Amino acid sequence: MTTLTDNIIGELSFNHTWSRPYQICFFDELMDVRLSLAGDETGFIQENQRSAYAHFNANLDFHLKTAEAAIFKYYLSVCYEYRERFGSEFADRMAPIITQEKELKILIKPTTVLIQESFDSDERIVGLLYDCSWDTSLGLAVKFINENIDEVGPQDIIL
């Protein structure tokens, strides 16, 4: 397995993306996820990827709490649509009605913090990726641009 050590991001290994284990706090519980950098196996890391990691990591807890609130708002906006799709047999299991942010913990699981390439722009792009009960094929993502939430939706908004 190919590895490299970046002075900002740390030791990474390549398996389709450059990645390493990473820990985040999810609804006050420490969780193991992957830190992943988009790119190819040449090991070239864009300066804006280093900057995105450094800026995001500097206020990680704040960004994660902001993401939790945004996901809750997003879920409330799509919950009834998904409940209709699932029908009465599966609605309560796949897209239950919830009233508090912390109830999301049973519906979503963080998997990856993705530091995306931004090519010719100066944007710092970070995506938080989750598995979720209501969309098992596309999952869920929170896309940050320059440490501000840009969008919440299926993972294809960041991949």
Image (tube, rainbow, N blue to C red):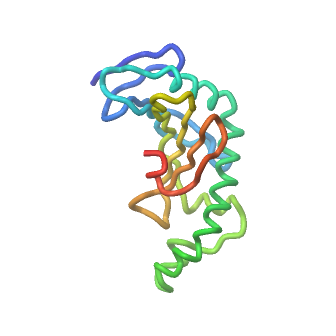
For the image, the number of numbered tags is 0
Q: Residue 125, percent across and down? A: 54, 36
Q: Quadrant of residue 70?
A: bottom right
Q: Residue 25, percent across and down? A: 63, 42
Q: Quadrant of residue 63?
A: top right
Identified at 62% across, 29% down, the residue is 57
Q: Quadrant of the N terminus?
A: top left
Identified at 55% across, 62% down, the residue is 107
Q: Residue furthest front?
A: 120
Q: Residue furthest top?
A: 7
Please state if 130 lies on the left or on the right of 150 as rendered: left
Identified at 48% across, 50% down, the residue is 157
Identified at 37% across, 30% down, the residue is 39
Q: Residue 106, percent across and down? A: 57, 62
Q: Residue 159, percent across and down? A: 42, 45
Q: Quadrant of residue 143?
A: top right
The foreground one among 80 and 94 is 80
Please state if 138 lies on the left or on the right of 49 as rendered: left
The foreground one among 51 and 118 is 118
Tell me: residue 49, above or below residue 4: below
Tell me: residue 153, above or below residue 85: above
The foreground one among 28 and 130 is 130
